[in-house]
Image: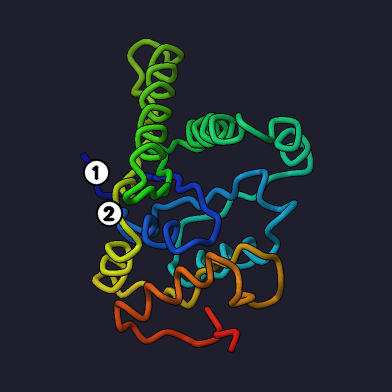
């Protein structure tokens, strides 16, 4: 159950998923945007996007990783990065008094990825309950976008009047999206299907 006024930590990478996940929280002004430690080393444009979204949506605050966090992330990179990231998010949420962590993972029709994400969330939630002091309420991990397809996400974004132009979904690093990677192509096609009108600079054509 979502409680109005509850402080929520959203794992934020500037993506459309993170944007929508922030907007569907009962009170965006109670949302803490947490940038995962692995992000700064590879996604400077995404960091700038997160900061822009925090200002635009009026989120409560932004937590950026320190140098020691980034170094630890590099050591935990690889097959454990998702688990490590979620544990870091829960630890940070608990220290900030947040009762819930929102992981904006979206697997759509990919059944195997969806099962993997759901299992990871369930197992970590059990571990968190074990480590929570008696009488205290454990931090919850929610995955509200898990089963949505890209078309369903765009429909939800439209219902929320989400400023998708303030998102970053390009796979490459640059001052503007490249327009040629698979992510840009996928989103450009989906936006065309939805007939939404967005800033062309967001997902430029390569023709």
Q: Residue at point 42% right, 38% down? A: 98
| Residue 9 coordinates in the image, percent (x, y) | 45, 45
Closer-to-camera residue (61/101): 101
| Residue 89 coordinates in the image, percent (x, y) | 53, 36
Q: Is residue 72 left or right of residue 106?
A: right
Q: Residues within 10 Å of mark 2 (few under 14, many from 20)?
A: some
Element at badge 2?
A: loop
Q: Residues within 10 Å of mark 1 (few under 14, many from 20)?
A: few
Q: Quadrant of the C terminus?
A: bottom right
| Residue 42 in the image: above or below residue 96 | below
The residue carrying mark 1 is: 2
Closer-to-camera residue (93/142): 142
CB contact under 8 Å: marks 2 and 1: yes
Q: Which label's residue is closer to the chain start, 2 or 1?
A: 1
Gap between marks 2 and 1, in whole Å? 7 Å
Element at badge 1?
A: loop
The residue carrying mark 2 is: 26
Picture quarter containing residue 117? top left
Total labels drawn = 2
Which numbered circle lies on residue 199?
none
| Residue 155 coordinates in the image, percent (x, y) | 26, 69
Picture quarter containing residue 29? bottom left
Q: Quadrant of the N terminus?
A: top left
| Residue 74 in the image: above or below residue 31 | above
Q: Residue at point 60% right, 45% down? A: 36
Q: Residue at point 33% right, 82% down? A: 196
Closer-to-camera residue (98/36): 36
């Amino acid at each position: 159950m979502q409680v109005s006024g509850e402080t929520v930590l959203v794992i934020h990478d500037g993506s459309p998923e993170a944007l929508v996940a922030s907007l569907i929280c009962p009170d965006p002004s109670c949302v803490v945007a947490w940038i995962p430690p692995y992000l700064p080393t590879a996604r400077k444009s995404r960091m700038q996007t997160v900061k822009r979204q925090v200002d635009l949506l009026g989120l409560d605050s932004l937590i950026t990783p320190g140098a020691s966090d980034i170094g630890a992330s590099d050591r935990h990179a690889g097959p454990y990065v998702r688990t490590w990231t979620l544990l870091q998010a829960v630890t940070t949420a608990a220290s900030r008094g947040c009762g819930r962590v929102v992981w904006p993972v979206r697997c759509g029709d990919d059944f195997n990825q969806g099962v993997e994400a759901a299992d990871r969330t369930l197992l970590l939630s059990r571990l968190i309950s074990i480590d929570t002091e008696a009488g205290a309420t454990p931090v919850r991990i929610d995955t509200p976008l898990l089963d949505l397809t890209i078309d369903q996400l765009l429909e939800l974004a439209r219902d929320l009047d989400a400023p998708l132009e303030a998102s970053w979904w390009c796979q490459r690093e640059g001052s503007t999206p490249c327009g040629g990677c698979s992510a840009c192509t996928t989103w450009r096609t989906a936006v065309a299907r939805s007939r939404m009108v967005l800033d062309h600079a967001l997902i430029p054509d390569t023709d």
